Image (spheres, rainbow, N blue to C red):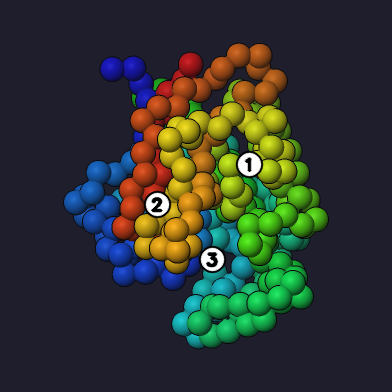
Amino acid sequence: MPKHLIITSFNGGRFLLEQTRAYLKRLAVGEESRPDVMCLQDIPFRDLPLFEWAPYVTFAPMTNHLINGQRAVVGIAVASCYFMTDITHHITWGNGNLKDLQGVDCNNQRAVPTAEGDRVIDSTEDRVVICATIVKDGVEYNIATTHGFWARGGGVNDAKRSSTIRLRDALVHEAVCRGGLVFAGDLNCARSGDIYNMLTNTLHDCMPIEIDNTLDPDHPFVRKGGKVVNDYVMTCDIGHGSKTYDVSDVTLRSGVSDHCALSAMISRS
């Protein structure tokens, strides 16, 4: 069989709900099939021991959340079973100084559900990108993840546009420097509109067209009949003139968080 990398992108939902912890514990003890690499969003730093089965981990903080009345640093991470090198972090929103998240109550809900309340949160929560090279069986795989900028109602505002431009530019820069890359993460944007088009002008969306929702079936939006693709696997080949990665076997796993876990097989073209 050709050499490949199994990757899973997973939004832990900050709280690490009961089903989320159960899933991660099953991974930890080997009761679940482990991917080679996990791209993680909304993961509390204090819960990284759940990924001790992956000897290589890099974490990028976004904010100091207020979860169940206690502060907890939350961010994104890449956890790998294989050697990880050339790790870079890019800030796409904020200044890189960790802040206590403001504008939320003790249950981590938005205290003032208005545009002004959103601006308070945005001023105390960074957005970041992690890029890294994973080496498996002598083959290098360049992987990136982020947790995209959130805007009320799935809309678009100037802050989201600015963050997305910086995200796109960071991914393009890393793809040019590394020889292409695979992105897997929660972009917080639907598969249409300005934000999606801004990214897919330079990245290739590898999500099968038949996948029309990546939120868990028990998510309130889905229970009301809604569907949206927020989680993606994409490739960026810019600067190389040819396809650098193949993405196949894209699947979703529900029942593990408020988003489905997104998995795919990655191979070098």
Q: Label 2, on which residue?
A: 260
Q: What residue type is labelled 2?
A: Cys
Q: What residue type is labelled 1?
A: Ser
Q: What residue type is labelled 3?
A: Val
Is residue 26 shown left or right of residue 35? left
The quadrant of the image that shows the N terminus is: top left
Query: Which residue is painted at 37% across and 57% down in the image?
Result: 217
Residue 262, position in %: x, y? 41, 44
Q: Mark 2 or mark 3: which comes first in sequence?
A: 3
Label 2 crowd bin: few (<14), some (14–19), many (20+), radius 10 Å? many
Q: Label 3, on which residue?
A: 74
Q: Mark 3 or mark 1: which comes first in sequence?
A: 3
* Element type at mark 3: strand
In this view, the mark in front (3 or 1): 1
Residue 45 seen in the figure: no
Label 3 crowd bin: few (<14), some (14–19), many (20+), radius 10 Å? many
Query: Which residue is painted at 56% across and 32% down in the image?
Result: 205
CA distance for labels 3 and 1: 28 Å
* Element type at mark 1: loop
CA distance for labels 2 and 3: 19 Å
Q: 86 or 240, which is in the foreground?
A: 240
In this view, the mark in front (2 or 3): 2
In this view, the mark in front (2 or 1): 1
Q: Is residue 41 above or below residue 191?
A: below
Q: Label 1, on which residue?
A: 192
